[in-house]
Image (cartoon, rainbow, N blue to C red):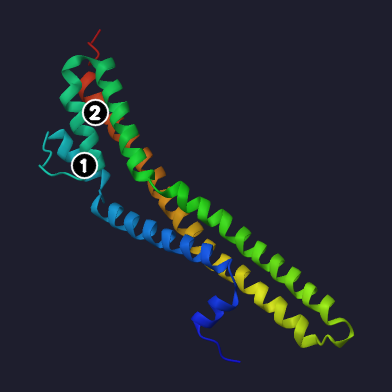
């Protein structure tokens, strides 16, 4: 038997609709995050070199240069004030890079459960049908209900696997950003506030 995607979707029943909605949300988040990260690509060494020269271009989207600009503009207020400003700015940068990732992880977690629920519901319908048919039931009647229910499990996994994979990739990007922000802050603190030791 040959079925189109539309036929399989309709055959899966009502549980396919929430999975469709979750898949659309997942695709939207993934595409938005890909564009977001592509615009904000950076190289740590190049960013440090520009910060050392106090050269931050206008319209900058580099998070490391953004953090460096916040550090440099607040450095005259003293080390404690500067570090507080930098910490708040770093927190804002990290939050903006994490946006949508929890939703993506949630979709990855609940999609298989919705698929499993659809499968269990399909089994319930199948056994209900068998009970009504009584002795006239055939293997085809039983199999039809089961494979229809299994469609939701397949759909749930198809939604969950890419969502989980992309969530992990994006989380790794955020972890790298956190490491690089700490590195840049360490360098800036050394450049601006380290007191050279006098020779004894």
In the image: residue 145, left or right of residue 79: right
Q: Secondary structure at mark 1?
A: helix
User: Which label was assigned to residue 145?
Assistant: none
User: Looking at the picture, does residue 25 appear above or below residue 176?
Assistant: below
Q: Is residue 57 left or right of residue 67?
A: left
Q: Nearer the viewer, residue 30 or 116?
A: 116
Q: Which mark is residue 188?
A: 2
In which quadrant will I find the C terminus? top left
> Looking at this view, is 7 or 110 the one in front?
7
| Residue shown at the point (54%, 76%) measured from the top left | 9
Residue at the spot 23% in from the left edge and 11% down from the top edge: 199
Q: Quadrant of residue 123?
A: bottom right
Q: Residue furthest front?
A: 132
37 up-or-down from 87: above or below: below
Q: Position of residue 108 (x, y in %)?
A: 53, 56
How far apart, in angstroms, are the residues tagged by discs 2 and 1? 11 Å
Residues 79 and 135: in front is 135
Label located before the other in sequence (2 or 1): 1
Q: Which quadrant of the figure contains the N terminus?
A: bottom right
SS class, disc 2: helix
Residue bearing mark 1: 47
Tell me the crowding category of disc 2: few under 14, some 14 to 19, or many 20 or more residues within 10 angstroms, Cα based: some
Which residue is farthest right?
Answer: 135
Residue 109 lies left or right of residue 135; in this view the side is left
Q: Is residue 102 left or right of residue 178?
A: right
Q: Determine whether 129 is above or below 90 in the image.
A: below
Q: How many marks?
A: 2
């Amino acid at each position: 038997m040959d079925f189109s995607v539309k036929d399989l979707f309709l055959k899966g029943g009502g549980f396919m609709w929430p999975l469709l909605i979750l898949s659309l949300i997942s695709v939207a988040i993934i595409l938005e995050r890909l564009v977001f990260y592509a615009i904000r690509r950076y190289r740590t060494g190049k960013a440090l070199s520009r910060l050392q020269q106090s050269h931050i271009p206008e319209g900058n989207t580099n998070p490391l240069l953004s953090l460096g600009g916040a550090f440099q503009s607040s450095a005259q207020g003293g080390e404690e004030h500067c570090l507080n400003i930098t910490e708040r700015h770093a927190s804002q940068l990290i939050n903006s890079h994490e946006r949508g990732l929890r939703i993506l992880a949630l979709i990855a977690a609940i999609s298989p459960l919705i698929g499993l629920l659809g499968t269990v519901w399909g089994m319930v319908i199948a056994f209900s049908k068998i009970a009504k048919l009584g002795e006239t039931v055939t293997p085809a009647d039983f199999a039809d209900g089961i494979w229809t229910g299994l469609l939701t499990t397949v759909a749930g996994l198809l939604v969950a696997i890419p969502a989980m994979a992309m969530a992990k990739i994006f989380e790794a990007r955020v972890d790298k950003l956190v490491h690089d922000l700490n590195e840049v802050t360490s360098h800036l603190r050394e450049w601006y506030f380290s007191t050279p030791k006098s020779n004894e």
